[in-house]
Amino acid sequence: MTRFPIDEFQGLRTPFYFYDLKLLDQTLSDIKRTARDPRFKVHYAIKANANPGVLRNIQAAGLGVDCVSGGEIEAALEAGFRGERIVFAGVGKSDEEIRFALEANIGCFNVESEPELLIINEIAGEMGKKAAVALRVNPNIDAHTHEYITTGLAENKFGINLELLPAMIDKAISLDNIDFKGLHFHIGSQITETEPFVMLCETINRLQNEYNAKGITFSSINVGGGLGIDYAHPERRPIPDFENYFKTFHNHLKLRDGQEVHFELGRSVVAQCGSLITKVLYVKEGTTKKFAIVDAGMTDLIRPALYNAHHKIENISNPNGELHHYDVVGPICESSDCFGKDELLPTISRGDLLALRSAGAYGEIMASQYNCRKLPHSVFSAQ
Ligand code: LLP
């Protein structure tokens, strides 16, 4: 359970992200315990959070890292991840990023189109290198999640459609500077049911049978990320159910000898250890509503404005006060700059600190400077 050192928070500039490193470490230990199958390799999806203080712990726990830009590869290398533990995905890798990744001797490129495959082959050839490549397949699976974070359906900018896959595999095998490793999948994010993952395993089994019959084998299968977390009850299950998640792949995926399975978990690793701490500037009494106007806005945590997401709000200055309804809103000049409507919260006064929970993933990293605001800073619990 995350404890907020409220006395230590007094006098700190707000808003800031507070990271509970003890919870992060417990989460990482649980991943190591439940992913103990030696064929399983977990790469942390750094897009969820690249704060160096967070990355250091993830690197120390022995995870690899999944990157989608040259900047993310740089952040990973700075945090101490070795090149071979880095995979590089994304539909639009620039020539400079490809060159940088090859220089860093990354473990694998997840390739999403034929022109990208050809350019990687060309640049690797110029550099006298061979690029390890997995092809990202679009498996046409509905992950039952928000439309902006569903990625596995057929008509999508991501991945290669199943009909086009045979030609792409032939191409990858034929190119001199490409070392074809296998297939990559990612069906979406914040997936809270087991069924989409079972469907993914079944699709992979079918594809493996089909291709093995043609004499094509894969040394690695990458199943992407997507395991969801409980935003409504951050304390009920602060560590996601990794046991069930990895067991699903263990039970349903039919692996061949010597095959590795790669996972790219982002949200489930870091979401629950982070909270956005914000100070109440004003309590404005309307005719029917009370507004708590806070100093954090959509620039600090964009998920509510962008995805209609809800992060649990707590009044950590007055946790036991009498309950009232408030709309909790930020200072940005946009009506979507609202963290919660009709929130039942203990009496809020000017100067109180509120915690927006489960904000460790896609929080700080998605912050912007709109309205010329300062980026939020970060504070860490004692470990
Ligand atoms: N692998 C690939 C290829 C991905 O595209 C993603 C996330 C992941 C792994 C990690 O997925 P996770 O385990 O975190 O679900 N900003 C949105 C989420 C965007 C996810 C994009 N891709 C949000 O705040 O909900």
Image (cartoon, rainbow, N blue to C red):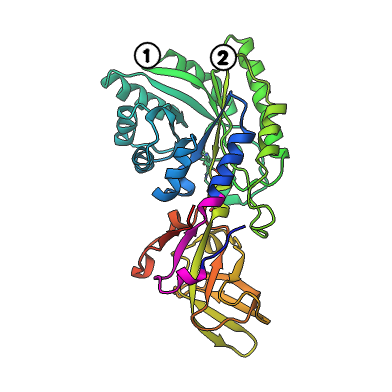
Q: Toward the viewer: 198 or 15?
A: 15
Q: Residues within 10 Å of mark 1 (few under 14, many from 20)?
A: some
Residue type marked 2: Thr
> Mark 1 or mark 2, which is nearer to you?
2
Residue at coordinates 40% horizontally, 63% vertically from top-left? 376
In percent of width and height, residue 89 lies at 45, 35
Which residue occupies 54% across, 51% down? 22
Residue that extends furthest to the bottom in the rendered view of this protein: 287
**Number of numbered labels in the structure image:** 2
From the top left corner, tell me how far across and down residue 171 is, in percent.
45, 17
Q: In the image, which disc is placed on residue 151? A: none
Residue on which disc 2 sits: 217
User: Residue 132 at x, y = what percent?
Assistant: 42, 22
Q: Is residue 42 visible?
A: yes
Quadrant location of the N terminus in the rendered image: bottom right
The answer to whether the residue labelled 1 contacts the one labelled 2, judged by CB atoms less than 8 Å apart, is no
Residue shown at 49% from the left, 48% from the top: 48
Q: Position of residue 330 (x, y in %)?
A: 49, 73
x 63%, y 50%: residue:
229
324 vs 91, left or right, is right
Q: Is mark 1 within 8 Å of ligand 1?
A: no
Q: Quadrant of residue 118 in the image?
A: top left
The verdict on residue 19 being magenta is yes
Q: Which mark is residue 176?
A: 1
Residue at disc 2, secondary structure: loop
**Bounds of the magenta segment:** 6-23
